[in-house]
């Protein structure tokens, strides 16, 4: 007869889940983003890039996918969190071949201080650079990115806008095997400080609350472009997602434009030329 001492404890789906795997499945879309980098770089520079640096790299999934794309591709992944880089070394890096592992470097450092080889592409995605809330700090970061690029390289940033940026709200979305919840929990209308959380809910009713939390400043695309120019970039281009003209539904397609209708929420990219 089983005793209290030898009974196996019941584990919920939340207990067994890996928050980094959930994040990669629900938030990140590295193949789409790398397609955008490849296509945009070729449109602007006439070739496909080979060298990339991924700032705020987290699990470095984008860098891993980058070195898998072409045998000529190299990647540098920078993050100041040792835990998430250790996770990458345990879960993502082992999926690369020995040859691919030679073309990727993971660096634990602050993006404001790190010095790396110059690259053709530098990406800062998932709005992580919005962690910088002071204009002087954002300017310092953009100057560092400019120094890290070759003369004909490109900086890729993501950006979002619309009235929903300035509201507390929750967005729920079903993903394979779980539900993803994005919560904008607090917004300060004076400072534009936005506190956000990511929660995960599972079919057995278990939950991971505040699996990830962020405090950002909501930056406007215009002010970011102005800071980029001040940092030494010669030109910036905004690529805003397209919307279905009949339904106003957002599409997975982006257009270079300086115009945006008053959509409640829109996503986009800023591409900056040195």
Image (tube, rainbow, N blue to C red):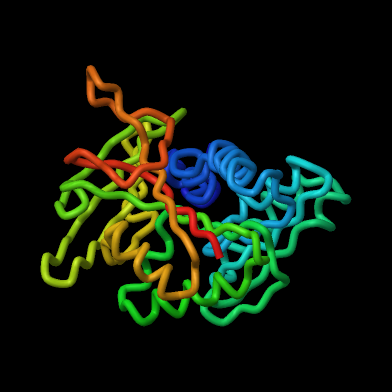
Q: Residue at x 59, y 71 (%)?
A: 82
Image position, residue 31 (x, y; %): 59, 38
Q: Nearer the viewer, residue 244 or 19?
A: 244
- Residue 3 left/right relative to 187: right
Q: Residue at x 65, y 78 (%)?
A: 115
Q: Quadrant of residue 266?
A: top left
Q: Nearer the viewer, residue 258 or 178?
A: 258
Q: Residue furthest top?
A: 246
Q: Nearer the viewer, residue 161 or 84?
A: 161
Is any atom of residue 58 visible in this view? no
Tell me the quarter of the image containing the N terminus.
top right
Image position, residue 59 (x, y; %): 59, 55
Residue 15, above or below 274: above
Tell me the quarter of the image containing the C terminus.
bottom right
Image position, residue 96 (x, y; %): 78, 46
Q: Residue at x 67, y 58 (%)?
A: 120
Residue 12, above or below 132: above
Is any atom of residue 250 visible in this view? yes
Q: Residue at x 59, y 60 (%)?
A: 122
Image position, residue 190 (x, y; %): 12, 71
Q: Nearer the viewer, residue 36 or 111?
A: 36
């Amino acid at each position: 007869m089983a005793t209290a001492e030898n009974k196996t404890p019941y584990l919920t789906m939340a207990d067994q889940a890996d928050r980094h795997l959930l994040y990669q499945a629900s938030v990140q879309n590295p193949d789409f983003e790398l397609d955008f980098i490849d296509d945009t770089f070729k449109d602007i520079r006439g070739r496909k890039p080979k060298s990339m640096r991924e700032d705020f790299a987290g699990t470095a999934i984008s860098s891993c996918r980058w070195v898998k794309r072409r045998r000529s591709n190299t990647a540098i992944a920078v993050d100041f969190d040792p835990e998430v880089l250790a996770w990458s070394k345990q879960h993502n890096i082992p999926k690369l071949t020995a040859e691919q592992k030679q073309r990727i470097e993971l660096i634990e450092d602050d993006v404001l201080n790190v010095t790396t080889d110059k690259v053709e592409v530098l990406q800062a995605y998932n709005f992580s650079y919005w962690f910088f809330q002071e204009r002087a700090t954002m300017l310092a970061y953009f100057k560092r990115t400019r120094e890290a690029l070759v003369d004909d390289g490109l900086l890729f940033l993501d950006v979002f806008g619309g009235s929903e940026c300035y509201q507390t709200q929750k967005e729920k979305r079903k993903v394979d095997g779980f539900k993803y919840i994005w919560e904008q929990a607090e917004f300060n209308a004076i400072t534009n400080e936005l506190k956000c959380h990511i929660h995960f809910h599972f079919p057995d009713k278990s939950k991971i609350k505040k699996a990830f939390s962020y405090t950002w400043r909501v930056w406007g695309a215009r002010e970011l472009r102005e800071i980029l120019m001040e940092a030494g970039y010669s030109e910036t281009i905004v690529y805003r997602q397209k919307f279905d003209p009949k339904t106003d539904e957002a599409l997975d397609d982006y257009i270079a434009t300086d115009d945006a209708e008053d959509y409640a929420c829109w996503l986009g990219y800023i591409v900056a030329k040195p």
